[in-house]
Image: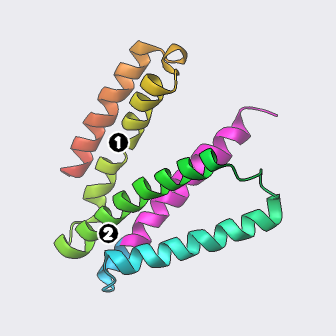
Amino acid sequence: MTAFWPLFVGGVAPAILWGITAIFQKQSAVSGAGSSAYLIAFGLTLAAAGTISALIWRPAPWTADGVGFAAIAGLCFAVGTGLISFALFFYGVPVSKLAPIWSCNVLVTLAVGAAFLGEAAEVDLIKLTAGTLLIIGGAVLVSNA
């Protein structure tokens, strides 16, 4: 297997789908759905997708640790998504202004992965610093466009 498919499946395709998700999140807010309605509809769709996935792929056994970490991830995702939906609905912020800012989440993931998951040894510090500056600079430029 080449390096292309894992990066496409786990990186490119999700980036495209999450970008499209932001557009529909904005449309939901413009159509009058508040944060709670959005989170409920979104969550029910995720639950249905999880059920279908379990039926197709026969997942690994459920463990208390695994489910606990998944629940914490879901809580973080729900709060973040709810805040985005609130900003879109209540303040009417353009999605094109918010998306560059929330795309900086990779910097949080990098920092936490390096600090708590022991992945710092796998990172080239010069490239990491340059990439971080480019991401922040790009977010500032695009969100102020």
Q: Name the dominant secondary structure of the magenta segment.
A: helix
Give the magenta range.
1-25
Residue that protrudes farthest toward the bottom in the picture: 32
- Where is residue 32? Give x, y as percent: 30, 86
* Left or right of 113 in this view: 104: left
Distance from the alpha carbon under mark 1 to that under mark 2? 18 Å
Residue 85, which numbered label?
2
The reply, left or right, for residue 49 in relation to residue 60 is left
Amino acid type of disc 2?
Ser
> Which residue appears at 41% of the width and 64% of the height?
22
| 140 sits to left or right of 104 | left
Q: Residue at x 17, y 71 (%)?
A: 91
Q: Nearer the viewer, mark 1 or mark 2?
A: 2
- Is residue 97 part of the magenta span, yes or no? no
Residue at point 60%, 52% (across, down)? 67
Front one among 34 and 126: 34
* Amino acid type shown at disc 1: Cys
Q: Are marks 1 and 2 in contact (CB under 8 Å)?
A: no
Q: Nearer the viewer, residue 42 or 7?
A: 42
Quadrant in which residue 33 is drawn: bottom left
Q: Residue 104's mark?
A: 1
Q: Secondary structure at mark 2?
A: helix
The image shows residue 36 at horizontal and vertical percentages of 35, 77
Mark closer to the chain start, 1 or 2:
2
As helix, strand or loop, the secondary structure at mark 1 comes to loop
The spot of residue 61 in percent (x, y) is: 77, 52
Q: Is residue 19 above or below residue 25?
A: above
* x, y percent for residue 84: 31, 63
